[in-house]
Image: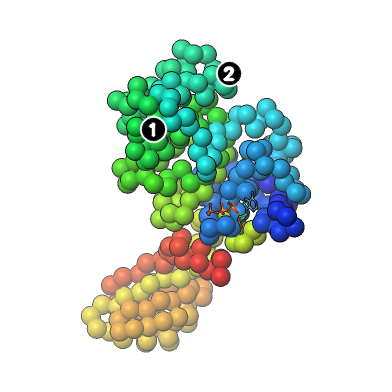
Amino acid sequence: MLSVLGLTRDYDGTTVLDDVSFDVRPGRMTGFVGANGAGKTTTMRIIVGVLAATRGSVTWGGEPISVEQRRRIGYLPEERGLYPKMKVHEQLVYFARLHGRATAEAAARAHELLDRLGLAERAGDLLETLSLGNQQRVQVAAALMHEPEALVMDEPFSGLDPIAVDAMVSLLRDEVTPHMPVLFSSHQLELVEGLCDDLVILSHGRLVAAGSVADLRGREADRFRVVLAGDADASTLRDVPEVVLLDARGPEATVELRDGPPEEVLRALQSVAPVAEFARVVRPLAQIYREAVQ
Ligand SMILES: Nc1ncnc2c1ncn2[C@@H]1O[C@H](COP(=O)(O)OP(=O)(O)OP(=O)(O)O)[C@@H](O)[C@H]1O
């Protein structure tokens, strides 16, 4: 497990990251979200070791992270870091060689990754001749070239079209092993929602929420939407002792379960009126996010 403990970073006396602690659990995708300037890039840079913390630490497996461990992280930097005048395939091999990979092995891996990302035909082209979205795909391939043991990716999906996002998501899913912690920042909440298991939310340099998406949603796990059949008035559900009626409009209502498993509650509701629909309310991630940063 990769963890940050009490991370704090000051710039010229201004604290931009304030006592931030969270875990990036292995084998799970952790989405890292927060408004512009919240401190995500700063945190990621500290994790990979290109920026020093003012206070706090980064650990891997419970021990302070070593230089060697940091080399085994696949990092996608925000500022990107490819050579515009170098050919795509050559460039990927070069990055893998920097990580000590043999040339033949690196060449095969580069072909495989370019193929997975739909860029096989561009292998021999100069990077600068690719569209920005395609350069982004090459950047992701570069981060994966040395078969990293952890991934830290700063907005890997920004600027990608939906097809490219799908290819990237599928590639990441294949690359993530059960031992691999993965942290990626994004402003695309629907994407994070579909992809991540855990979520870390920063606001103004402070941690406001961290945990599994299921847990963060679970705060309202017992909230159900009820639609009564016909034009029955849902306000009559006020008399059902098993629920608290939160909202009623025509035949539709939102209720919170007070007592008992959902099947029993449904039976209690049906004793008042025929029920056409009874479904747990799942809060969209965007709502969890807005509530957390408010
Ligand atoms: N080199 C620097 N000198 C001074 N302030 C900096 C420096 N780098 C970052 N900051 C400040 O630190 C704060 C956090 O920035 P950071 O880039 O970590 O945020 P972020 O969450 O990644 O934002 P974004 O979503 O826009 O990428 C911002 O207020 C930024 O202006």
Q: Which residue is mark 1?
A: 128
State the image coordinates of residue 51 (x, y, percent, origin top left): 67, 42
Residue toward you, 51 or 260:
51
* Sequence-earlier tag: 1 or 2: 2
The answer to whether one can see residue 36 in this image is: yes
Q: Residue at x 42, y 17 (%)?
A: 108
Side of 63 relative to 190 (left or right): right
Side of 232 relative to 178 (left or right): left
Q: Residue at x 65, y 60 (%)?
A: 206
Q: Which residue is mark 2?
A: 100
Residue toward you, 98 or 176:
98
Quarter of the figure that contains the C terminus: bottom right
Residue 191 versus residue 114 in the image, above or below: below
SS at mark 1 in the image: helix
Residue toward you, 168 or 244:
168
The answer to whether one can see residue 215 in this image is: no
Residue 266 versus residue 232 in the image, above or below: above
SS at mark 2 in the image: loop
State the image coordinates of residue 220 (x, y, percent, origin top left): 50, 68
Q: Nearer the viewer, mark 1 or mark 2?
A: 1
- Amino acid residing under circle 1: Glu
Q: Residue at x 35, y 69 (%)?
A: 278
Q: Residue furthest front?
A: 85
State the image coordinates of residue 212 (x, y, percent, origin top left): 55, 53
Q: How many C-alpha atoms fall within 10 Å of the one at disc 2: few (<14), some, or many (≥20)?
A: few
Q: How many C-alpha atoms fall within 10 Å of the one at disc 1: few (<14), some, or many (≥20)?
A: some
| Quadrant housing residue 254 | bottom left
- Amino acid residing under circle 2: Gly
